[in-house]
Each structure stands twice: as C-alpha cells, then as structure tokens.
Amino acid sequence: MVEKATFFKVRELKAKKMLEDSTLRAVANKNTMVTFFEFGPNTSIMPQHKHPHEQTSVVLEGSVRMVAGGESKILKVGEGVVIPPEVEHEVFPLEPNTKVLDVFYPLREDYLE
C-alpha cells in the first residue's frame, strides 16, 4: 500500500515549551524527525546533554555557539553540525529569536509527547 504525503506549516505544528521560554515544534514520519527550535529571549543556554540519537543541526535565523565533543564553534545562518550518538553537546544562542532546525534518527519520542 502506498502511503500518502503529509503537508504541514511550521507555525501550525504543536509548540512544546522548552527551557525557560523556548519552543520546539516537531514533525516526524516512521524513521525520520525534524524539529524547529526557537530560543526565547530569556534562554541563555541549552544545557550540556547527550542522547542515543544522531543529530544534524542547521541555524535558520540568528547564531549560536555550539560546543560538541569538547569543540566550540560559532554557527551562523546556513551553518550546522552533525553530532553522533552519545556525544555531549550544549548550545548558547547569541542573538534574540535564534532558530535552529534539527534532524534526528531514530525518532526522539520525548519530543513527540
């Protein structure tokens, strides 16, 4: 059976509150997931963490300082990082309303709740 495509508008995806005042919107299929993370004006850090998922992140608006695996880089619009599973990382937004697109494999079930 052929599955049907699902179209969406980012602004209409359910917003999940993250950290102090940031939001995450997620869209997923069976094997892939994309999230749209928007840092709020009072969020100064996505604290250091790790997870079993592969993660690819791209800055859509603003800029961040990404620390991953002990290496620190400033990422601007159109720049990103590929983070292997279990690599510790943290993110510092450098501008108000910074937006980051993240791709995860496998799905992050905690983001779909």
Image: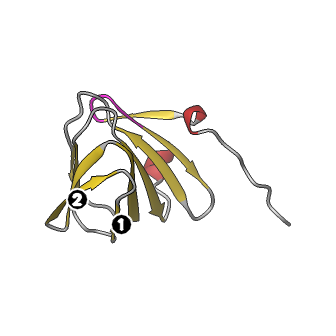
Residue at the disc numbered 1: 52
Instruction: Left or right? Give the position of 3 relative to 101.
Output: right
21 falls in the magenta region: yes
Residue type (three-letter) at the residue carrying disc 2: His
Residue at figure coordinates x 55%, y 62% from the top left: 32
Q: Is residue 101 above or below residue 54?
A: above
Q: Quadrant of residue 99?
A: top left
Residue type (three-letter) at the residue carrying disc 1: Pro
Mark 1 surroundings: few (<14), some (14-19) or many (≥20) residues within 10 A? few
Say what secondary structure mark 2 lies in. strand
Look at discs 1 and 2 and give the one toward the viewer: 2
**Rendering coords of residue 68 (x, y %):** 21, 63
Residues under labels 1 and 2: Cα distance?
12 Å
Q: Nearer the viewer, residue 35 or 78?
A: 78
Residue at the disc numbered 2: 89
Q: Is residue 16 above or below residue 26?
A: above
Residue at figure coordinates x 31%, y 28% from the top left: 21
**Rendering coords of residue 3 (x, y %):** 79, 60
What is the basis of the colouring in this image? Answer: secondary structure
- Please report whichever mark, 1 or 2, sits nearer to the chain's N-terminal start: 1
Query: Which residues fall within the magenta stretch?
Result: 19-23
